[in-house]
Image (spheres, rainbow, N blue to C red):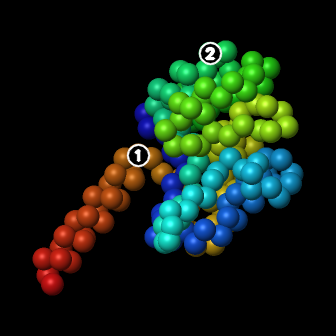
Amino acid sequence: MKHRYIVCDPDKCSGCNQCELICSVAKTGVFDPARARIRTVRIEPVVMMSIACRLCEDAPCVVACPRKALTQDAETGVIHVDNDLCDGCAWCIEACDFGAISLNPQTKRVEICDLCADKEEPQCVLICQKEALSLSTPEQVARQARKEVVGQLLKELLE
């Protein structure tokens, strides 16, 4: 089963960082983008997008953890961190292909997006004024990409 995760449309993302701010407030109570579990990445000069945990199947971060501090919920795909077991070794950070795991500088424990499990919907998705963020599955992302490619090909053929 493929899990829904936060997807960013770089054509819509303005790089406003509101997703980082709302995430940090929702998770820590302070406006501090460095404490967010979503990151806005800028590929200069024009591409911007936000990245959060992709809830990978057979998540490499979970496999890499030598202390078994990370577990993955079979139903939602969310990666849970057991703070009693996590020692901040950062092996999970190294294993993440998306750069979606951060180390809390105060607690020295890793933090991973949990899709705002304590709320109805991820707060970053709700606050995004450009509607660049959404919840999607890998299949939905692939279907949309195929649709866009076919649309572009048809456009080129008709020109």
**Quarter of the figure with residue 108:** top right
Q: Is residue 121 above or below residue 111?
A: below
Identify which residue is drawn at 64% across, 51% down.
Answer: 38
Q: Amino acid at mark 2?
A: Pro
Q: Label 1 belongs to which residue?
A: 138
Residues 104 and 79: in front is 104
Mark 2 / mark 1, whichever is N-terminal? 2
Seen from this angle, which residue lies furthest bottom?
Answer: 159
The picture places residue 129, in percent across and down from the top left corner, at 63, 72
Q: Amino acid at mark 1?
A: Pro
Task: Kindly tell me whether residue 12 is visible in this rendering.
Answer: yes
Q: Counting other residues with Cα less than 10 Å from the Cα at mark 2, is it few (<14), some (14-19), or many (20 or more)?
A: some
Q: Nearer the viewer, mark 2 or mark 1?
A: 2
Q: Label 2 belongs to which residue?
A: 66
Identify which residue is drawn at 68% across, 40% down.
Answer: 102
If the image is split into quadrants, where does the C terminus sit? Answer: bottom left
Callout 2: helix, strand or loop?
loop
Q: Mark 2 touching mark 1, by CB under 8 A?
A: no
Alpha-carbon span between mark 2 and mark 1: 28 Å
The picture places residue 25, in percent across and down from the top left corner, at 81, 54
The picture places residue 96, in percent across and down from the top left corner, at 53, 35
Residues 16 and 94: in front is 94
The picture places residue 95, in percent across and down from the top left corner, at 53, 30
